[in-house]
Image (cartoon, coloured by chain):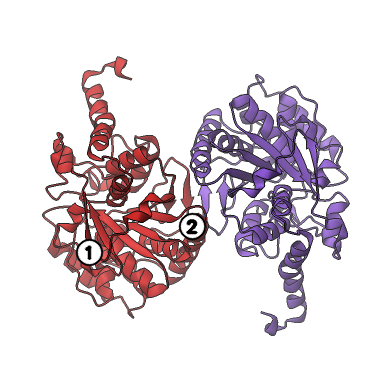
Chain colours: A red, B purple
């Protein structure tokens, strides 16, 4: 079901009153051809974060047809998160930190800039970073008053690249992870090397502005503002967030991700500054090829999928069955409807 | 301290776990010269809602110099709300439903249209109203999972005019209330009569689109989505909201406002479809002229001031003293600083 990758078992926390916050945003780093597959084509990549957020509330996307997927059709991890939220019914809110396209749902706006392409220029103005962190602190503080712990997830295409650049800026030696098994390592290394030249000092706000992204800035602010523990639901990105948070102030944090990330030798979980647990959504046992792809190293994590899987296990829910039901309802039925034109299925 | 104006005493509810939601927005009805004093001059009126929201989080406004005030300097009721939130420390969130100017704080965006001037045209497209109500329902449902009751306040200049038009559309016979003691009754009556001609049927969504405003639409959605009781903190606007809500579905609602509204024979509290309590912030006993103006019928209510005053009393806090402290800190000190240029006071 799950394994403690680093530190101690914090699953007790997940049986308390929780609020889930999904932070969504964009970095233009995703526009570098080949760097991410978080979208069926380059034009669609920018819609992935808002579409993921819409999926969680409505069980379908409003800003795109179908759901976010890789160019060869592997579905977004938002399917796992959707299933987990359906099972556990915990309250959740979407936070925009640097979105290009607004989701068609209620969302909290941090008025963050879209992150720049870190291969070409600094990610964000320092003043913007400070403002985003400050606003996110207000949110973290207020949300922490209504629960015992927060779970914070993310959706930002190319976020593993900015995260690796952040880790490297701290003098760490991250491997470079990806939502693809044939990780475009050489490309990412070139981007990161270019980005690192702009880091003037190994200080968290400077690192965020030079090579980070707006989602990382928001996650840091939320954790620092919270008066309760914060579970960072994600892989490499949350490892980078943990380092930033620990260098910015005091916060009780832990990381929950998927075993698909943990099994990837490039995933850097050991570099986290906090405990790490990896949960297994068991998608390898699915009857659906699209879901089994996760077991083979595709997609792996995102939209808080690992943390929300762990939440289900901590509360005694099975995940795989519900994910398959969601897959049928959200992916298969609409396709078969389109194929057969059967209006009775509406 | 407070009086039950209609129905029963629901103050017990205020001792439970609460979340405060402030809904802010604009209607172009406020552009009609003389219809509102919720702003020092016509240009500033549109900044009043975002500035009120900023004041609650930061104890100062970021979008304008000073704080929202009437043309002759009577301060925004956000001062009362700020003091009450400081005393009670309840979590709160700001919801934008049709703002012209975004506040420089984290806020939830319903992506509502700015309300049109109801003297000239229909307030909102019916489809927009439906979307706003739907999104607000999602929020109401999710926030109601983290508390025992919600308090919902509002800030929208000229909101009493749209509210009176809504009540009249239901076949009720509202008096016309205002933030001014010399209520521009004739002007408002003309606006309302013009607006009413556009109401095609006495049905809540139609009334909202024809003569309502985006803040009313959001308040309705929140109440209808909530699984817990909702305390509508406001005067005539919340009376209109109560009628809309009751005609749209089932929701456990109550109104909490100020005695300044209750004493105004034009305030229509008896037309509410739910219990009403009026709380007395005791500003008549203040040493400051600007605060005593409330007792004389100026401003009266807004930004949830009455409901949050009642919250303080239910929890055993004094309000007047804290409001005076806030007035000193937010209004008097900056003026004296500007007058003396004394840097040591920074």
Q: Chain of mark 1?
A: A
Mark identifier at residue A144: 2
Residue B283 or B109: which is nearer the viewer? B283
Q: Percent x, y for residue A50?
A: 37, 45
Say whether disc 1 or disc 2 marks the residue closer to the N-terminus. Answer: 2
Mark identifier at residue A269: 1
Q: 10 Å neighbourhood of mark 2: few (<14), some, or many (≥20)?
A: many
Residue B74 or A269: which is nearer the viewer? A269
Residue A293 or B14: which is nearer the viewer? B14
Q: Residue at x 31, y 58 (%)?
A: A28
Q: Percent x, y for residue B15?
A: 65, 49
| Dot 1: element | helix
Rendered-image quadrant of the C terminus of chain B: bottom right
Q: Is residue A135 visible?
A: yes
Q: 10 Å neighbourhood of mark 1: few (<14), some, or many (≥20)?
A: many
Q: Is residue A179 visible?
A: no
């Amino acid at each position: 079901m799950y394994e403690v990758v680093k530190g101690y078992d914090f699953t007790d926390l997940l049986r308390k009153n929780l609020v889930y916050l999904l932070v969504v945003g964009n970095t233009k780093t995703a526009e570098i051809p080949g760097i991410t597959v978080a979208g069926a084509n380059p034009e669609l990549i920018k819609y992935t974060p808002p579409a993921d957020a819409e999926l969680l509330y409505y069980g379908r996307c409003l800003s795109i047809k179908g759901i976010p997927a890789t160019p060869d059709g592997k579905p977004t991890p938002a399917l796992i998160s959707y299933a987990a939220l359906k099972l556990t019914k915990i309250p959740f809110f979407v936070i925009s930190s640097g979105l290009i396209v607004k989701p068609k749902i209620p969302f909290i706006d941090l008025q963050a800039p879209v992150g720049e392409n870190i291969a070409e220029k600094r990610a964000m103005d320092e003043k913007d970073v400070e403002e985003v962190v400050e606003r996110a602190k207000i949110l973290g503080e207020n949300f922490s008053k209504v629960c015992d712990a927060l779970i914070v997830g993310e959706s930002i295409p190319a976020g593993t690249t900015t995260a690796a650049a952040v880790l490297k800026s701290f003098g760490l030696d991250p491997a470079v992870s990806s939502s693809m098994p044939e990780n475009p390592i050489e490309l990412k290394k070139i981007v990161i090397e270019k980005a690192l030249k702009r880091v003037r000092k190994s200080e968290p706000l400077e690192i965020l502005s030079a090579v980070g992204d707006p989602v990382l800035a928001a996650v840091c602010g939320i954790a620092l503002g919270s008066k309760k523990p914060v579970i960072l639901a994600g892989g490499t990105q949350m490892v980078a967030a943990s380092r930033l948070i620990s260098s910015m102030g005091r916060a009780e944090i832990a990381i929950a991700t998927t075993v698909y990330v943990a099994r990837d030798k490039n995933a850097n979980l050991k570099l986290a500054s906090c405990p790490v647990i990896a949960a297994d959504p068991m998608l390898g046992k699915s009857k659906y090829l699209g879901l089994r792809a996760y077991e083979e190293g595709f997609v792996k994590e995102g939209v808080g999928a690992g943390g929300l899987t762990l939440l289900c296990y901590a509360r005694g829910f099975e995940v795989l069955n519900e994910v398959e039901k969601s897959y049928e309802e959200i992916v298969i039925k609409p396709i078969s409807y389109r194929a057969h034109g059967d209006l009775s299925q509406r």
